[in-house]
Every structure is written in structure tokens, then in C-alpha cells.
Image (cartoon, rainbow, N blue to C red):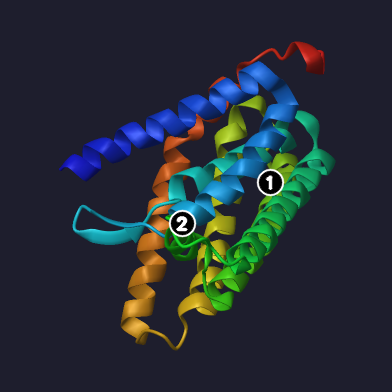
Amino acid sequence: MFNLAWGILFVVVNFALFLLCYRLFGKKGLYAWIGFATVLANIQVVKTIELLGVVMTLGNTVYTSIYMSTDLLNEKYGTKEAKQAVWFGFFSLVASTVIMQMALVFTPQESDIAQSSLETIFGLMPRLAAASLCAYFISQFLDVRVYSYLKKRFPVYNQFWIRTNGSTGLSQLVDSLVFCTIAFAGVYTLDVWLQILLTTYLFKFVISVASTPVLYIARSFRIKEDGN
């Protein structure tokens, strides 16, 4: 029960910091959030926990906030800004991966205490790194495109929840499918692979639905630098 209670608090804190980042820094804050959220998500995914009897990885909450950021950018500033933010996040992910892989190659001093821990966190197999990069690239651009379509199909101001949940729900399904296929296909039996896929997607989707009121709050902010 501790993990459940702590997990709820963890989600609330993530959402609160997301709102604070946008409230304080506006559009630039959303870009910054996407940049470090992509890095944090790939660090947190190394840690596994048990929640409600299901073993899962961390990182899903902060990763979901990336979709929140691109959807909010798409809603308030347009498709071009959302696409540019996706590229920014992709660059952040690639750059941090390259830099940390190079950092691991340095020969540590005899009394060094960091090398083994850094290898555990950043020394991911190339297959997992490829899975993460491909899943991010495909799903994030899909999210932007689907959101833009839904914005035309459901343009009413109060239909925001349809736009954000529809685009995120589909793109996160694709994200989970791409990642699990590249990372785990052939590693686990089909039934285990399906369990990983379904639990990963369902948890992300629950977090996305829970984020809907947060996005409504964020959309209502009057950001001075944006002229709102």
C-alpha cells in the first residue's frame, strides 16, 4: 500500500511542477520541461516497482507529461510549435545518451564510487536505447498529427478533453507497441510480452486521463510573455 500512496503523491507532485514550470516560464517552460522529462524518463525506467500486484518501471508519469506539453503547445500555439518541441526533446534524448556513453568510457580513479552506478543507469544495451529513441520519435510526431486532426474535427473549446485524450491514447499505444517490440520481442514468450505491453500502456493511459484537469488549468493560465 505504501507504493500506491507514494505513487499518487508522486503523480501529484509531477503535475504540480508541470503547472508551475508553465506558469513561471510560459512557452519556454514547456520546451524546458520536454527537454529534461525525456532524460528523466529514461533514467527512471531503470527502476522497477510493484504496484497493485503488478511489476512495472518508473518513468511513465514524467513521460506522460511530455504528451501534456506537446498537446498544450498544439492547443495554444499551433502545430509548428508542437513539432519543434518534439524535435527539441528528441535532440535532448540523443545528446544526453551520446554524452553519457562517452563519459562511461573514461577510466575511473581507484577510489571512484560513481562508475558502477552510472553504468547501471546509463549503460543500457543498444537495443533498449534504440527502442526508446524509436518509440519517442514515432509516437510524439503521431501525437502532434492526431491532435491537429482532432482539433479540426472537434474544434469546440470545451472539447479539449477529446483532443488531448484521443491523441495521447492512440500515440501512447503506438509508443508502447514500438518500444516493447524492439526491446523485448524474442526475449520473452508471447504471453509475457503481451502482459508487459498491456500493463505499460494501461498505466500510461490512466495517468493521461488523470492529467486532463491539469491541462485545463494550464490552458487557463494567462501568460504575460505570450500576450495572453
Residue 121 versus residue 165: which sits nearer the camera?
121
User: Looking at the image, which residue is at 46% across and 57% down?
Assistant: 112
Distance between the Cα atoms at labels 2 and 1?
48 Å
Q: Which mark is residue 147?
A: 1
Horizontally, is 141 left or right of 23 in the view? right
**Quadrant for the N terminus in the image:** top left
Q: Quadrant of residue 161?
A: top right
Where does the image place residue 97, in percent across and percent down from the top left? 64, 61
Residue 69 versus residue 166: which sits nearer the camera?
69
Residue linked to disc 2: 112
**Please, what is the three-letter code of the amino acid marked with disc 2?**
Asp
Residue 119 can be seen in this image: yes
User: Looking at the image, which residue is at 79% across and 15% down?
Assistant: 225
Residue 13 versus residue 139: which sits nearer the camera?
13
Q: Quadrant of residue 162?
A: top right
Viewer-side label of 2, 1 = 2
Neighbour class for label 2 at 10 Å: few (<14), some, many (≥20)?
few
**Please, what is the three-letter code of the amino acid marked with disc 1?**
Tyr
Q: Which is nearer the N-term, disc 2 or disc 1?
A: 2
Neighbour class for label 1 at 10 Å: few (<14), some, many (≥20)?
many
**Quadrant for the C terminus in the image:** top right
Q: Do tag 2 and tag 1 residues touch (Cβ < 8 Å)? A: no
User: Looking at the image, which residue is at 69% across and 63% down?
Assistant: 98
**Secondary element at tag 1:** helix
